[in-house]
């Protein structure tokens, strides 16, 4: 199964509470923090919702 490397690039300060909750659900805690998650539709949807705060890369 493919995996996604998600890195938080920008601070969530000033963003909506929903976006903060989404970052926390992804496991991101601070700027430049990176997590690796399974490539599932739920994870892609959460990353898409906060696409202005994170970068997503596919990992083999």
Image: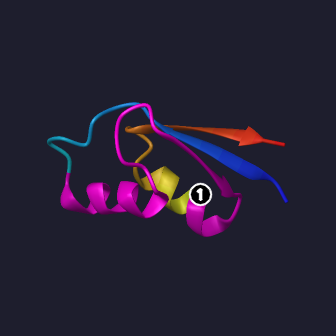
- State which region is magenta: 16-43
Say left or right for 38 vs 6: right
Q: Classify 3 as above or below 52.
A: below
Residue displayed at 64% across by 66% down: 41
Q: Position of residue 48 (x, y in %)?
A: 49, 52
Residue displayed at 85% across by 60% down: 1
- In the figure, residue 52 lies in which quadrant? top left
Say left or right for 17 vs 48: left
Q: Which residue is farthest bottom?
A: 42
Q: Classify 31 as above or below 27.
A: above
* Quadrant (top left, top right, bottom left, bottom right) of the C terminus: top right
Q: Position of residue 49 (x, y in %)?
A: 42, 54
Q: Which residue is farthest left?
A: 14
Q: Position of residue 42 (x, y in %)?
A: 58, 68
Say left or right for 11 vs 13: right
- Pointer 1 residue: 44
**Camera-nearest residue between 33 and 10:** 33
Report helix, strand or loop for mark 1.
Answer: helix
Residue displayed at 33% across by 32% down: 10
Residue displayed at 19% across by 54% down: 16
Q: Is residue 35 magenta?
A: yes
- In the figure, residue 31 lies in which quadrant? top left
- Label 1 Cα crowd, 10 Å radius (few <14 / some 14-19 / many 20+): some
Q: Position of residue 28 (x, y in %)?
A: 42, 49
């Amino acid at each position: 199964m493919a995996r996604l490397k998600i890195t938080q690039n920008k601070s969530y300060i000033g963003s909506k509470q929903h976006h903060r909750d989404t970052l926390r659900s992804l496991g991101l805690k601070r700027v430049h923090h990176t997590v690796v998650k399974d490539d599932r539709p739920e994870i892609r949807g959460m990353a898409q919702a906060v696409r202005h705060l994170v970068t997503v890369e596919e990992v083999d």
